[in-house]
Amino acid sequence: MNGTSRWSRILGKLAAFVGTAVIGGLIAATPAGAAPAAAPAPVVAATPATPAAPLFSGWICAGTPVPAGHVITSIRQDSGCGGYSWFVQLPQNGLWICQTQLPLPPGYVVTSIRQDSGCAGYSWWIQYPQNGMWICQTQHPLPPGYVVVSTRQDSGCNGYSWFIRLG
């Protein structure tokens, strides 16, 4: 007897056979003229030029900061929020928004004002400005490039409106 058990010899032969089969399979699978694999190109994350505003429409508790670029389009009593909640969404041309202390979204003008129970006060119809249109006189600045050429009393604006043109 040479000092090794029968099981040790069997396992040794099995390991040698499996190792040979694996290495042989790898050699057979590689084409003879194959060049060594090149290192993979580094992955670089794309960085957007300007971060997009979160696309959010929904109810938030009154007093919560309104997401950037959004407007309030409805106000309701909400005991879960301790009083009121606001429905917020991104502005669009031709939309009723609630009159609040928030600045008017850039690029929009108010063209009508109405009393609105859904806003617990007044709501404003916002649109993109156009050369030669009537807009409501509000505390918001005129869009860049426009001038007021006429003023009139206007019940649709709950006060006065301005006729604007590109100046």
Image: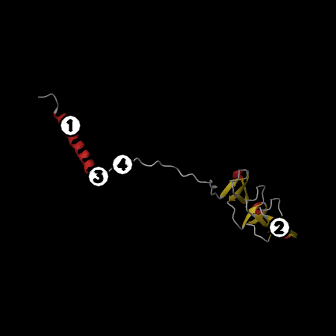
Q: Which residue is mark 2?
A: 157
Q: Earlier in the sequence, mark 2 or mark 4?
A: 4
Question: Which mark is drawn over residue 33?
Answer: 3
Q: Are marks 2 and 1 in contact (CB under 8 Å)?
A: no
For residue 18, above or below residue 153: above
Question: Which mark is drawn over residue 88?
Answer: none
Q: Residue at x 83, y 67 (%)?
A: 157
Report, in whole angstroms, how far the alpha carbon at label 4 lies from the one at label 3: 12 Å
Q: Which residue is mark 1?
A: 12
Task: State the SS at label 2.
Answer: helix
> Could you tell me residue 43's position as x and y percent?
48, 49
Q: Are marks 4 and 3 in contact (CB under 8 Å)?
A: no
> Could you tell me residue 135's position as x and y percent?
80, 67
Task: State the SS at label 3.
Answer: loop
Q: Single out the mark in the foreground, 4 or 3.
A: 3
Quarter occupied by residue 88:
bottom right
- Closest to the observer: 62 or 55? 55
Report, in whole angstroms, how far the alpha carbon at label 3 lies from the one at label 1: 34 Å
Q: Are marks 3 and 1 in contact (CB under 8 Å)?
A: no
